[in-house]
Amino acid sequence: FVSGVGDFKEDPVRRDMRATFPYLLELTRLNTNFNLERFPTVGRNFQMYLGEEAAPAGSARAATRRRQAQQVMFFRGIGHTAELLGEASDSASSIMNQALDELDRGMIDPKVSPFASSRIFINLIPAFKGDIESIKEEFNKLMDSVISQSANRLLKLRVDEIEVKVRLQNEDGSIQPLRLMASSMSGEWLRTDVYFEYPDPVTGVTKQFCPVNDDGELCLLNPYPTSNQIQVKRATARRVGSTYAYDFLGLFEVTLLQVWDEYISSLNKETFGGVEEVVMPGNVFEAKELRLKEGKLNVDDERRMVGTNNLGMLAWHCTLKTPEYPEGREMVLISNDITVQSGSFGVKEDEFFARASEYARQRGLPRIYISSNSGARIGLVEELKPKFRVAWNDEMNPSLGFKYTYLNEDEFKALPKGTVDAELVEDAGEKRYKLKSIIGQLNGIGVENLRGSGMIAGETSRAYDETFTLSYVSGRSVGIGAYLVRLGQRTIQMSNGPIILTGFSALNKLLGRDVYTSQDQLGGPSIMGPNGVSHLEVANDQEGVRSMLQWLSFTPKVKGAAPPTRITTDPVARPIDFMPSKQPYDPRHMLAGVITDGQFTSGFFDRNSFTEYLAGWGK
C-alpha cells in the first residue's frame, strides 16, 4: 500500500511481491511516465510490465494519447551471482537469455502493439571485485556474445535498451554502484556505456547516473523518459515494415561480427595442413556520413546527431573488414529515410542521391542502395485547399461530374502572384477565375520533382556501367524508387517490400472494380521473383544485410580489381563425391554438394561457397 491523503491505497504494480522487490527492480522509474500493466512471468525473480506512455492529466492530448500511446515492454530481473558472463542460472548472461524468452511470451499477447519496443533491466546483488575497466571490458564481451548469438531475436523483440546494475567493491571496502548500459536511444544500435550511480544517502534510491568518462555528457535523471525523436522515427519506420535508416549501420556491424565468428569457427572445425591462424580484426565496420554542402558531397567530420536530418535521403562512406578483405574494403551506402515525408523524392533528395551515386562511381566503389520510399513528392498548395470551388454540371447532383474548378475574385486576388494560372470567365452572374494550373510558392512540390527523377534514373544507368550497384528493398518502393531498383545490377527484396509504380487502390479505381487487394499482387516477391526483377528474397532486414554482405564477398574491392579470395578448408585437390544417377536429380547437389543421412557429399564447388540467385525466374 502507498500513503494517500489521510488513508492508504493499494499499488497494483507491487501486488504479490516481496517487500524489497520494488526497490531492487526500480519500479518507481517506470510508473512516473508510463501506465503499467503487469504480465505473468515464469522466473520467480523476474517481473514484466507493459507500459503505455502517459499524457499529463487533464491535457488536451490526453484522449488522443490514450488511443495512440507508444508501448514499451519492460523486463526486470534480479541475479544473485557476481558474474556477467557465466553459466550460473542467475548470471547476467543467463538472465539475458531468459529475458528474451519472457519477452517472446509477452509480445504474443493481443494487448501488445506489433510496434511496441522493449527494455531489459538486470540487478546483480553481490558486489564485484575489480576495477571499472575490467567490468567495462566484461560487459562489452557480454553484449558482443548476446548480439552475436541473438541479433535476430533482439531485432524481432525491438529491444532498444539493456541495463545491468552492479556494485563495485573498492580496495577500502566501500561500494560504488555502476550502471552498465547498451542503448539505442541516441541512434547507434545498442551502444555500450558505463555510468557511476549516485543513490540518495538516506533512502538509497538512485538519484542520477553520470558517465564514467567525463566527455561533457549530461547526467541522466531517474524516471524512464517518454519517446524521444529517435524512438518516434524508429517506430514510424517499423510501422511501414522497414528499419530506421541509421539502424542499418548497427545491423551491418553486428552481421559482420557474426560472419567472422562463423568463418573462424568453420576453420577451426575443419582444418587442414597449411591453414594459418585467423583472428578477427578490430573495428570491423566504420561509417562516415556524407553531407551535401554548397553543391559538393563530402565526408562529415563533425558527425551530426542522429535524427537531425531534414532530407529524406542519407549516405555513408563505409569501411568493412571482411574475411575476404581483413585489411578493409570500402563501399558507399545510400538510403531513403522513410521518416521524412514518407521517404519521398523531392528536388533536394534527387540532388543528394545523384551526388552520392556519382561519389561512388568516380571512385569505383560498390554502390549499395536501401530503398524504402513513396516515390516522387507530389505536394499540395495548402493555402489553396480551403478556397477553391467547383462548378458542377448539376448543382443538385454532383455525381454527374463538374465543368471546372475556380476561385472567386476576392480569393484569387488574396493569393500571391504566380500561385495559380487562371482564366477569367463569367458564369452564374459572377466573375470566376477558372483554374488552368496550380503552381504554388514553394519549390519541390510539383513537376520539378519529376525532372529530378529523370536525373537520378540517368545517374543510376551510368553507375550500372561504371561500378557495382546493389539495391535492397526494405519497404515499399514506389514510382522512381521502383525504377532505381530496376536500373541497378542486382536486387534483394524483403518479403513485405513491394516494388510498384502506383498503389492497388488507384488501379482499382481506374478499372472500376476491385481487382487487386494488396500491393504484393502488383510488386511483391511472388511477382518480381519470377519476372527476374528481384534476384533474391529475404524475410527481414537482418537477413537482408547478411545477403548484401554475402553478395559483396563475390565482388572486387574496386572496379577492375581481382576477384576476392579467402582461406578455405576445402582442399583444392580433392575428388567430387557426388555421382549423377540415371534418375532425375537436383543439379544443385552436383554443384554445391548435399548432406545425406548426416554425411556431406561434396560437389563441384568449394563447400558453402555456392549461392543461387534468380531461383524463381520464369517459373
Image (cartoon, grey):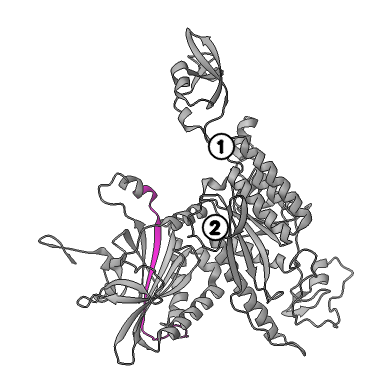
Tell me the residue at 36%/67% (across/down): 218
Which residue reaches farthest front? 294
Q: Quadrant of the N terminus?
A: bottom left
Residue closer to the observer: 2 or 478 = 478
The answer to whether residue 80 is magenta is yes
Separation (CA) of disc 2 from disc 1: 26 Å
The answer to whether residue 144 is magenta is no
Tell me the residue at 65%/47% (across/down): 481
Q: Which amino acid, by three-letter code, is at mark 1?
A: Ile
- Tell me if 563 is positioned left or right of 204 in this view: right
Camera-nearest label, 2 or 1: 1
Give percent across and percent down for residue 424.
Answer: 54, 14
- Tell me if 617 is positioned left or right of 424 in this view: right
Per the image, the residue denoted by label 2 is: 243
Per the image, the residue denoted by label 1 is: 445
Which residue reaches farthest right? 582
Rendered position, 466 above or below 329: above
Q: Quadrant of residue 321?
A: bottom right
Q: Quadrant of residue 81?
A: bottom left
Give percent across and percent down for residue 117.
Answer: 44, 61
Regarding mark 1 in the picture, which secondary structure is present there?
loop
Residue 469 visible in the picture: no
Residue closer to the observer: 444 or 19 = 444
Residue 47 visible in the picture: yes
- Tell me if 184 is positioned left or right of 290 in this view: left
Q: Which residues are magenta?
A: 66-87
Give percent across and percent down for residue 451.
Answer: 66, 39
